[in-house]
Amino acid sequence: MNFLEERIIKDGVVKEGNILKVDSFLNHQLDVELFDEMGAEWAKRFEGVEINKILTIEASGIGIACVAARHFNVPVVFAKKTQSVNLDGEMYTAEVESFTHKNKNHVIVSKKYLNENDKVLIIDDFLANGCALQGLISIINSANATVAGIGIAIEKGFQPGGQIIRNLGYRLESLAIVDGMDPATGKITFRN
Amino acid sequence: MNFLEERIIKDGVVKEGNILKVDSFLNHQLDVELFDEMGAEWAKRFEGVEINKILTIEASGIGIACVAARHFNVPVVFAKKTQSVNLDGEMYTAEVESFTHKNKNHVIVSKKYLNENDKVLIIDDFLANGCALQGLISIINSANATVAGIGIAIEKGFQPGGQIIRNLGYRLESLAIVDGMDPATGKITFRN
């Protein structure tokens, strides 16, 4: 087990409905020492890959991306999530529809901060169905920029998002892949 | 002029309606090296003050708070902003009304992550009328925690938020206080 899997075992809480609560260290209270360790791990895994920008999405991706960015010496851009969209031509916009919730969201990045020279590492806290991630990839493609890689803290391996992204040929580095959770016992199974 | 004021002069854009656009380095694209320098500066200014937690508010405060927290060796908690609120008793909630926009927002923090032993440094990117900041202070008071200090990147000194907070006796350290902006010439005047 790696450091993140150990932390999930220690402080994560499994709830009914395939919910994994990690708000004590990952997405409400934030353990920035852990984020630093995650950044170092991604830097190791993406060593030799050209990366000049990190892209994340509000809100809980921002802290992880910013601390991790210190290991890459690159700026972070965070996409905004909104239900309405002001199409003023100065923004890249992706409409993403949740397969499970059926609601639509827009993912938005200013055209000023993404262009065809950018080699982008996407960072986010969770990957389940991959809706937000698909929106971020769509935006990078709109900008004619390159997806250099994707770093995810926790992937829910029993939901399809990660497999879809790998099928599409993207390099996806999830630090912890949860293959199963039992709300009755609290047991969490990680992929080897 | 300090490093942040210099950066504002270099990359900030003054728009009609007292708007200062700093989205190229502070709140859309994020210069994490600059955030680190800001963190070091707050650590210097709050040296000797007991701080065991940093509180910020989504979205643009999170990156600054996380990078700054590395200088304090404390966790970050970010408050969520929402227009509706589910009062389930597990959350501290503050209703804040914008004097200028008249809209109401709720600022929310889980009761698990704030308690009477916490000495809290509030960090945020902007202070103008101080609406969000008032909500954060209200939540810290609800938790019987202590406001150890407030660190703001850019204070609009010609709007009342900062003065109100100082009148209330809080220690407020704004790294740049803008006293005036001229959209015609782009000139920005800082407080000495």
Image (spheres, coloured by chain):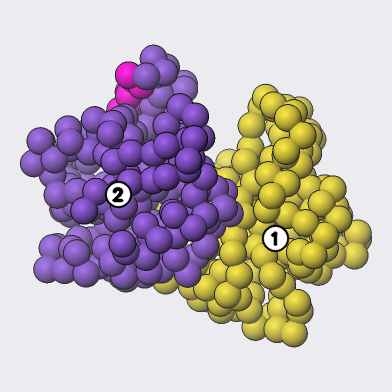
Chain colours: A yellow, B purple
Which residue of the protein is positioned furthest toward the front in this rendering? B185
Tell whether label 1 touches label 2 (CB within 8 Å).
no
Residue closer to the observer: A14 or B161: B161
Q: Chain of mark 1?
A: A
- Residue at 49%, 49% (x, y): give it: B12
Q: Is residue B1 left or right of residue B83?
A: left
Residue located beneath label 2 in the image: B190
Q: Chain of mark 2?
A: B
What's the amino acid at mark 2? Phe
In the picture, residue A156 is in which quadrant?
Answer: bottom right
Residue located beneath label 1 in the image: A122
* Residue A97 position in % (x across, y down): 78, 33
Residue closer to the observer: B48 or B75: B48
Which mark is on residue A70?
A: none
- Residue at 10%, 36% (x, y): give it: B168
Q: Is residue A121 above or below residue B153?
A: below
Q: Is residue B24 above or below residue B2?
A: above
Residue closer to the observer: A131 or B66: B66
- Residue at 47%, 43% (x, y): give it: B186
Q: Is residue B163 above or below residue B28?
A: above
Residue range in magenta is B93-99
Q: Is residue B6 left or right of residue A111?
A: left
Secondary-structure class at tag 1: strand
Q: Is residue A136 left or right of residue A165?
A: left
* Residue B16 position in % (x across, y down): 49, 29
Residue A40 on the magenta segment = no
What's the amino acid at mark 1? Ile
Pointer 1: residues within 10 angstroms few (<14), some, or many (20+)?
many
Prevailing secondary structure class for the magenta stretch in the rendered image: strand
